[in-house]
Amino acid sequence: MPHIAVDRLLKTYRISERDPGVMGALRGLVQRRYRTVEALSGVSFSLERGELLGFIGPNGAGKSTTIKILAGILRPDGGRVTVDGRDPFADRERHVARIGVVFGQRTQLWWDLPVGDGFDLLRDIYRVDAARYRRTRDELVALLNLERVLDQPVRQLSLGQRMRAEIAAALLHEPDILFLDEPTIGLDAPSKLAVRDFVRRANRERGTTVLLTTHDMHDIEALARRVIIIGHGRVLADSPVEALRAQVMAERRLVVDFAQDAELPAQVDGAKVHSRDGQTLVLDFDPSVTTAPALIARIAGAHAVEDIRLEGLAIEAVIARFYAMHGAAEA
Amino acid sequence: MSAVRELARPYVAAFASRFLQMLQYRTAALAGFATQCWWGGIKVMVFAAFYGGTAIAGAGSPMSLEQAITYTWLAQGLLVLLPWLGDPEVAQAVRTGAVAYDRLRPVDAYALWFARSAGWIAARLLPRVALMAAFAAVALPLAGLGAWAWQPPTGVAAGFAFLVSVVLALLLSTSMVMLLNVAMTAALNERGINAVATPVVIVFSGNVLPLALLPDAWQGALLVQPLAGLMDIPARLYFGQLAGWNALGGLALQCVWIVVCVTAGRFAMQRTMRSLQVQGG
């Protein structure tokens, strides 16, 4: 039986609307207008124990909604969710005792309490055994590099420190399942790396099942083996990260700087001219048709060239194209 | 025993954590105390002027001047028992959406909020009572203003009944704050709720005037309504106006209102949380 099973989830939100300006506000007093937005229209997938799944999609695609339903915070309008054999709503207290959740944009720590006091409070709220708690906390503090912030109030932490503390807070009760909703949002590079490294270890070494949403494709590349792309409340693709990467590899870009007085070729065999700017020519090519060395040799042999750079298409570009292809970009 | 302790652990921890956290705000406590001394002083002078006139100074008055003055200081000391604001921490959690995390704790959600709000009230109550007692019961007589001082309770029994009643008032206040908390959660904003709660609460709790000084025809209804249990019943016990069986009746009345408010609060919270939608992000 899968660790997490999601079957044809439906969720609509009712959003109140009014015309802008004074007249709109006055009209809104008399007559309220509502619009329904379909956040989820039949999302299904399943996750095995110990899997690490990346969840990507444009803003408003339904990623957070799915996580909130899985966490038992939000009731779906239709469909079924089973987490570790339990219904998150019928069995709320036992369900939430076994999951850890981080919402990157909200804080679960107490603003005015020192981080360590917040951890102690969570220990009591989850009724964690004292010896076990000390071991887990010390391990988390060491791995996430939190020694120096333990006695600082949460409001004084930097975003990177706070996020590391949030992740520790979500794991103090040693959950089997970790839901991370944009855990790297707004973090600087070292903090991102620390978070990724930590999540990877939790998954590999402790076998924690992880479901992660992100807009940072590097998170996906660094962590997930499988990725689900969601848009307009539907699963658009559910594939190994390898397949996505293959798509990325299918397109390469060659940037050629020609010498000052050299004339730029109108076209190059085996490649497509993407753009030209002064003495710089940008070419796209498929490495399975023309290899990079052959292309470079052809250009360098016929023209005076100053510099040549080879670029892989950014995974972001592929994803953006993918969203556009499926009409998934946010309206 | 240890099973009970384990069961109560999250709630005790939530209470203690909030209590200790609130104690840190010394400036707020001192500022509140200064304001309450000021208002207390004005009210005492108003009472002195009233009682100095002949209208209500006669034997028929339900309260002597000394009692009215002591009542004023008591009311000022117990001011934070008045549930005129929802818990600001809940308000903030609702506005930021952090309330979602409260749904993630494997505990009774109502009891957890209740414990936190009780800690919030208790931590503001104790320092203010102590400061107010030091000012009105000790400093004023020393300054030669003994006539305007806070007098001791009528007797030992009255003092004990008063203490029990204050503890019940704390629970009653918390259960009412919980109703405000749930209303704030349902409305997604605290301002309207607080604006309605404040005037109702300060009148019917007996904060503006001792309820005993309001018209005789209203007395029955005034004593039975829930807000009397916050300040007026403790004060009547303090003065021995409620004694013997009547004292027990007063305490029982507080308990009844606690049960009513908790039951209503639990029901409302369950309904609200069911339909709560944490959007965005």
Image (cartoon, coloured by chain):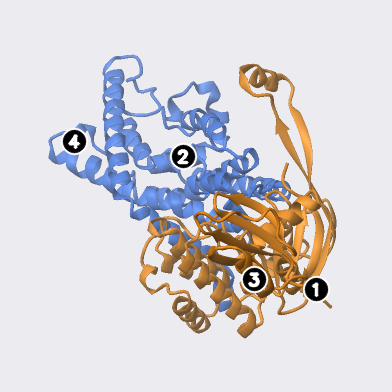
Residue B244 against residue B103 in the figure, above or below: above
Q: Chain letter of disc 1?
A: A
The N terminus of chain B - image quarter: bottom right
> Is residue B58 rendered to the left or right of residue B228?
left
Kind of residue at badge 4: Gly
Q: Which chain is orange?
A: A
- Which residue bears the numbered disc 3? A221
Kind of residue at badge 3: Glu
Instruction: Say few, some or many: other residues with alpha carbon within 10 Å of mark 1 (under 14 / 14 to 19 / 20 or more).
Output: few
- CB under 8 Å between discs 4 and 2: no
Comparing labels 4 and 1, the label whose residue is closer to the camera: 1
Q: Which chain is blue?
A: B
Q: Nearer the viewer, residue A202 or B132?
A: A202
Spot occupied by residue A264 in the image (x, y as percentages of width and height): 61, 54
- Which residue bears the numbered disc 1? A85
Secondary structure at badge 2 equals loop
- Residue drawn 27% across the image and 31% down it: B38
- Which residue bears the numbered disc 2? B82
Q: Chain letter of disc 3?
A: A
Secondary structure at badge 3 equals helix
Q: CA distance from mark 1 to mark 2?
A: 46 Å
Q: Nearer the viewer, residue B274 or A184?
A: A184
Kind of residue at badge 1: Gly
Q: Nearer the viewer, residue B273 or A84?
A: A84
Q: Chain letter of disc 2?
A: B
> Is residue B8 rendered to the left or right of residue B146?
right
Instruction: Say few, some or many: other residues with alpha carbon within 10 Å of mark 3 (under 14 / 14 to 19 / 20 or more).
Output: some
- Which residue bears the numbered disc 4? B146
Spot occupied by residue A113 in the image (x, y as percentages of width and height): 41, 60
